[in-house]
Amino acid sequence: MLKYLDNSDKNNYESIIEQYKEKVAHLEYRVAYLERIAKVSQTLNSTLDLDALLKSITQVATGLTNTEACSLLLYDEDAGELKFIPATISTVAEKLVGIPVPLDGSIAGWVFKKGRPMLIRSVQDDPRWNQQVDELSEFQTRSILGVPLIIKRQVIGVLELLNKQDDIGFTQDDIQIATTLASHVAVAIENARLWRDIQHAYSKLEEVEQLKTDFVNLASHELRTPLAVILGYASFLQDEVSGHASEQLEMVLSSALKLRNLIDDMINLGHIKAQDVALDVEIFSMRELVAEVVAEFDTLFAAKALRVKTKFSEGDDPVNIEADRQKIYLVVANLISNAVKFTPEGGAIFIELARKAQKIYIRIADTGVGIPKDRIGKIFEDFYQAEPSLTRRFDGLGIGLSIVKGLVESHHGTISVKSAEGKGSQFTVQLPISIDL
């Protein structure tokens, strides 16, 4: 049999339905709130546009709390007071930008100094209310919810929500929303400050780098002319004198040639840094080039009693390559020179040339002092020295490997290094057989 509901049952049923609807509405509100907070977080992690980000956050704040306006104040350490910043929601409140607010005798100042939220339902009844702000902005404030902007446990400013637009007034939920969004604001401001500091540091580094480059270029070019005169006269006098004077001139010539090589290195480095390396491309035999470089170092090998072993591709393969012969010669010569410099007397140097598919590999290994593990990543940097400048045992400007890397990369190649301190180093250069310029 069907049972009819009496008035009491109906009332209970309707009450349950209403409670259910209220819970659903509350859940829908919480979902919408979380979605908007998630969107703010996503925006925070994907943009460095501080003004747009702050306006987005303050817009979300007024929407979620149903308030008329939102304003942000940051602490000015030099002035010792708070100041309104852009990102205010409401056109009239934008007039406040830059206006100072004292820490004493103001609601925002109280929030800043105490580092905790403040809720005022009627500002007219609060002696800390600064009426001058309303006068300047032509905005009538009735109620305020202020929360501190905190980053790394330090208060940097205040977020204010103005005029709750319903009869209930500000609630605990509003405080939670404002506090959550204030943390996003604080992170955004801190990120912007860090980005600004990084940009400033990079700008300073670029200035220093440019000064260094300009000095190297100027010094290199200014030294070439007097050095050429010294070399010319020394060579001329060497043919005219003999005995002890001839030995002294030999030392002058040797030192002048060494200086010229250093100057040439600095000029080459300047071209590489400016990315204007001009390549005079031709087809030549890498086998002949490596043999030529090795022959050039025969005297140095003998002077240090170094055991040198070369290994070329099998057969009579000339290992032809399309490249700038002079620059590849400089690459191989620099690497062998380094091996000689850092290998003690009686050590060994191994030089290998191989072809694999469309790549040519040059491997130069030694039994020298090796490179400390924590310094391997720095050896291709300009002017890097593995030893302290005042106590180092090996001469040079520390730009040889930087030049080598630049010349290899200008040929679309790569260079890698393996090393163990006290056991030696191995450099491997990989070059394409043909480059597309």
Image (cartoon, grey):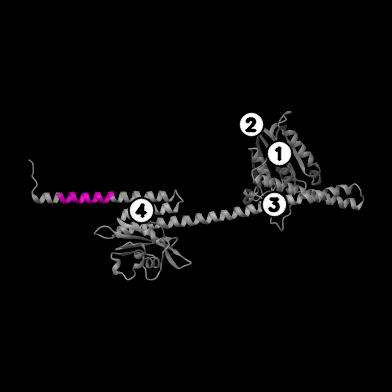
Q: Residue at x 45, y 60 (%)?
A: 152
Neighbor class of circle 4 (other Cα within 10 Å; few <14, some 14-19, many 20+) is some
Number of residues whose C-alpha sits closer than 10 Å to that of mark 3, classed few (under 14), some (14–19) or many (20 or more): some
**Amino acid at circle 3:** Val
On-image quarter of the C terminus: top right
Q: Is residue 432 left or right of residue 101?
A: right
Query: Mark 2 sits on what residue?
Result: 358
Q: Residues within 10 Å of mark 1 (few under 14, many from 20)?
A: some
Reading the image, the residue beneath label 1 is 328
- CA separation in Å, label 2 and label 4: 60 Å
Q: Which mark is residue 216?
A: 3
Cα separation between marks 1 and 4: 62 Å
Q: Pick the residue in front: 394 or 135.
A: 135
Q: Nearer the viewer, mark 2 or mark 1?
A: 1
Disc 3/disc 4 C-alpha distance (Å)? 54 Å
x, y (%) of residue 19? 20, 51
Q: Quadrant of residue 145?
A: bottom left
* Residue 433 sits in quarter: top right
State the residue position of label 4: 59
Residue type (three-letter) at the residue carrying disc 1: Ile
Q: Position of residue 139 (x, y in %)?
A: 33, 61
User: In the image, is residue 348 part of the stretch drawn in magenta?
Assistant: no
Q: What percent of the width, then of the height, locates residue 101?
A: 40, 66
- How many other residues sit within 10 Å of disc 2, few (<14), some (14-19) or many (≥20)? few
What kind of secondary structure does the magenta stretch mostly adopt?
helix
Q: CA distance from mark 3 to mark 2?
A: 38 Å
**Label whose residue precedes the other's in the sequence (3 or 2):** 3
